[in-house]
Image (cartoon, rainbow, N blue to C red):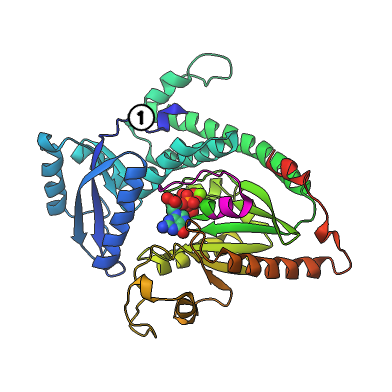
Amino acid sequence: MKEFIITDTPTDKAVLVGLITPEQNEVKSKEYLDELDFLASTADIKTVKRFTQRVDYAHPVTFVGSGKLQEIKAFVEDEDNEISRVIFDDELSPKQLRNLEAELKVKIMDRTSLILDIFAGRAQTAHAKTQVELAQYNYMLPRLTRLWTHLERQSGGGSGGFRMRGPGETQLETDRRIILSKIAKLKEDLKEIDKQKANQRKNRGKLVRVALVGYTNVGKSTLMNLLSKSDVFAENKLFATLDTTVRKITVENLAFLLSDTVGFIRKLPTELIESFKSTLDEVREADLLVHVVDISHPAFEEQLEVVTQTLNELSDEAKPAIIVFNKIDAFSHVEKETDDLTPRTKENISLEELKKSWIGKLHENCVFISAQEKQNIEELKALLYERVKEIHTQRFPYNDFLYQDYSDLEKAVND
Ligand SMILES: Nc1nc2c(ncn2[C@@H]2O[C@H](COP(=O)(O)OP(=O)(O)OP(=O)(O)O)[C@@H](O)[C@H]2O)c(=O)[nH]1
Ligand SMILES: [Mg+2]
């Protein structure tokens, strides 16, 4: 479905719009816009200006108040600025989207549609593509405007094509019908793919399953590569990983399966969580979670919280977890008002001190590493060994298949 994928040139310029509200103070709002900026650059969009407004809640018709809207409009209409889109930090209602489009006359995006665009651009396998497409149609359905009239032309004719407009049917009704049948078809396709995936998982035998989870861009794939000596795609962009990869890892003769999957983000579109349920099965069915946190990110605590909440939404039962604080080579300080550490630079803080700090006390099973600089990986491996062995012996008290050779398994896992 090429029509969704961003095809604009990298010089596509945008302005960002966010709110400062009682729930979202100025500092938070800035952090969110920084992240929106990062999302935009991941989608090859350059942001040239930010607008924020202090309000109690979003305006139901235009998201921002009329004065602010005129300010944005003046900036967008100034040809020197070459603005081709305006991106809002929160999900816009269909009504807000329609009104903003009519008023600003450039492409309007929100956090959700931007994330969906990035996912569409990144999806590689049939599985990921089907999931993203389904999420996009679900997002689109309540937001249909005449903008989508191209749908009918695209789908007309050919076997398996959609019926042209029925008698007395308006364009919008036709578009709605077309999208509904596409959604139905995609759901069918997904069901089929899910069945295959479930079978594959069944064939994996009884190895303990460990899943890497965490906010996007924290270093999950880098850690996967390090532990499995494999070559999973990792880069400094959001959502580098969409498809799940599973590898067999051996730590001191103890074999287990490690999976690397899509990262989370705050305000992850519900359409995406819905569609990616099967990808996230890997997480739901894991015996142990390795929650990777980027300690160098100023908002790492909130990211940790977002991931924990998303995990709670995915599964009712709390799973055993290890917290891995990654990027210790890049963080600058760990001070906090009530902290036992005074603000200092990273050079002055030892691993021992980190463990004793408020960060180290966040969780009983935590370890501080740098996946990139390969720092303290032995401690992580030792902790993994301990936890996996525990799960294994609980499950198979009389079985020593722990030490068998599983070389055939890896192939089965990733087929
Ligand atoms: N400084 C530093 N950078 C790191 C470290 N580990 C990973 N990175 C960098 O962080 C960026 C993101 O790494 P990835 O491994 O792609 O992160 P991810 O969590 O898999 O990201 P998504 O797949 O996008 O969710 C890359 O540029 C890595 O090189 C680390 O220990 N220190
Ligand atoms: Mg990744």
Q: Main secondary structure of the magenta part?
A: loop
What residue lies at 37% left-to-right and 71% top-to-bottom? 346
168 relative to 375 in the view: left or right:
left
Please state the horizontal and vertical placement of residue 119, each as a whole percent of the image: 46, 41
**271 lies left or right of 335:** right
- Number of residues whose C-alpha sits closer than 10 Å to that of mark 1, classed few (under 14), some (14–19) or many (20 or more): few
The quadrant of the picture occupied by the C terminus is top right
Q: Position of residue 267 (x, y in %)?
A: 41, 56
Quarter of the image where one finds residue 348: bottom left
Q: Nearer the viewer, residue 287 or 93?
A: 287
Residue at image position (66%, 59%) is 210
Does 166 sit above or below residue 415? above
Left or right: residue 365 versus residue 396 is left
Please say whether residue 234 is one of the residues in the magenta stretch: yes
Rendered image quadrant of residue 7: top left
Kindly tell me whether residue 92 is visible in this rendering. no
Q: Residue at x 37, y 25 (%)?
A: 149
Q: Is residue 24 magenta?
A: no
- Give the residues in magenta: 223-237
Q: Is residue 176 visible?
A: yes
- 2 or 381, nearer to the observer: 381
Residue wearing tag 1: 7
User: Which residue is outermost to the top?
Assistant: 158
Q: Position of residue 369 (x, y in %)?
A: 50, 65
